[in-house]
Image: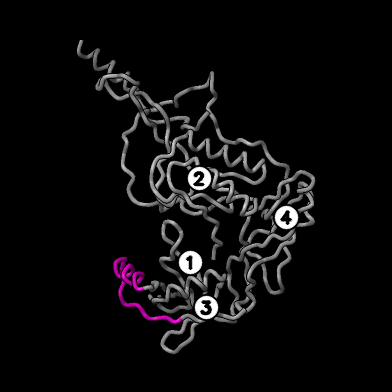
């Protein structure tokens, strides 16, 4: 039970490179508190789902959880004990490509301590270093 | 509220490299504009600006060549992690004029609807207001302890200090006490029966290959 696109133009993708830092999606925009990644990488759909479950279980239907990333990229893999060649493998899973600074999860309408605890649990499910951030009031 | 004073130096160098050199020296590039005068690039002390913004100041007095110029913070740019200030925009103002700015809303109390199983949700965290420079409130306190279940708080219902008016549409929702929604709103793929892969909208590779084989024959 994981997220993936409903329609794609091409099924299989190149691996690509992650260059630069997040210049968009790097602020808390929907909730009051967020989880920001400090390094770049791929977050799989299963990891996103694990994070969402960790947050929603801890919050006990209080507050709101926002997921700011979506796994748009397909990752293919060859079956075990298969010789090399014979073309690219079949799609194995889907990942979200994130750059340093991206806010991946947000929580709103709860106390800071509750949000901090919930997002710490989410951070433990993520494959990279994360930090807790709060919304900055606009000038 | 007392208006803080910041020491300012005029800045001649422009460009990202010159700005980066200033930041290494503990200075902050900024710009002043407004009041029909030409925009002026300036340099501020980083620590002073950081402290001033952290305390929620909107107006500062800039001492430039012996002259005091009151200015309003219009924008602050941060780095990609939101940790360090990179640049600030300041607008010249007159202390007797009315200014438009965002002020944080401070929700006080626990709504009585929460005890009835409701959840307090706020849609706005800042309120755009218009007021005299001398009467800028630090925050807008809103007592929500009287809110019942399914009650909605609109912008027009917020009590503002004297001389302060809101800029937003009065019917805009600020906060509400509602029953909690169902947990999952994410489109999840069903385990059985649903598509395991997304629909491909480009011309299929198999179809192209098939055409190629037919040509060879």
Mark 3: secondary structure: strand
Mark 1: secondary structure: strand
Which mark is first along the chain, 4 or 3?
A: 3
Look at discs 3 and 4 and give the one toward the viewer. 3
Question: Could you say where residue A71 lies in the image, as x and y percent from the top left?
Answer: 45, 36
Q: Chain of mark 1?
A: B
Q: Chain of mark 3?
A: B
Question: Which residue, given by chain and number where applicable, does mark 3 sit on?
Answer: B60
| Residue in view at x 77 percent, y 57 percent | B145
For the residue pair A32 and A55, the one nearer the viewer reads as A55
Question: Which residue, given by chain and number where applicable, does mark 1 sit on?
Answer: B75
Segment colored magenta: B7-25
Question: Which residue, given by chain and number where applicable, does mark 4 sit on?
Answer: B153
Look at discs 2 and 4 and give the one toward the viewer. 2
Q: Chain of mark 2?
A: A
| Residue in view at x 54 percent, y 80 percent | B4
Mark 4: secondary structure: strand
């Amino acid at each position: 039970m994981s997220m993936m696109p409903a329609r794609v133009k091409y099924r299989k993708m190149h691996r690509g490179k992650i260059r630069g830092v997040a210049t968009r999606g790097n602020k808390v925009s929907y909730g009051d508190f967020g989880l920001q990644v400090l390094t770049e990488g791929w977050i799989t759909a299963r990891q996103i789902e694990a994070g969402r479950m960790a947050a929603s279980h801890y919050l006990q239907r209080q507050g709101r959880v926002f997921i700011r990333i979506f796994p748009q990229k397909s990752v293919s893999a060859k079956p075990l004990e298969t010789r090399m060649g014979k073309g690219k493998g079949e799609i194995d899973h889907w990942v979200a490509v994130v750059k340093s600074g991206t806010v991946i999860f947000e929580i709103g309408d709860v106390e800071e301590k509750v949000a901090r605890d919930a997002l710490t649990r989410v951070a433990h499910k993520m494959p990279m270093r994360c930090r807790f951030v709060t919304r900055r009031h606009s000038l | 509220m007392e208006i803080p004073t910041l020491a300012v130096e005029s800045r001649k160098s422009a460009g990202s490299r010159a700005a980066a050199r200033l930041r290494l020296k503990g200075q902050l590039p900024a710009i002043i504009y407004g009041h029909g005068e030409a925009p002026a690039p300036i340099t501020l002390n980083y620590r002073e600006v950081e402290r001033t913004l952290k305390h929620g100041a909107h107006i500062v007095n800039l001492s430039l060549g012996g002259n005091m110029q009151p200015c309003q913070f219009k924008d602050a740019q941060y780095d990609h992690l939101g940790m360090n200030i990179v640049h600030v925009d300041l607008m010249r103002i007159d202390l007797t004029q009315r200014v438009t700015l965002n002020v944080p809303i401070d929700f006080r109390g626990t709504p009585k609807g929460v005890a009835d199983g409701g959840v307090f949700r706020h849609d706005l965290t800042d309120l755009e207001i218009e007021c005299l420079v001398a009467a800028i409130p630090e925050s807008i306190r809103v007592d929500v302890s009287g809110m019942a279940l399914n009650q909605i708080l609109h912008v027009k219902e917020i009590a503002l200090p004297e001389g302060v008016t809101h800029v937003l549409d009065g019917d805009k929702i600020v906060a509400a006490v509602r029953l909690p929604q169902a947990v999952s709103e994410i489109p999840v793929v069903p385990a059985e029966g649903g598509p395991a892969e997304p629909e491909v909208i480009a011309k299929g590779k198999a179809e192209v290959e098939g055409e190629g084989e037919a040509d060879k024959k």
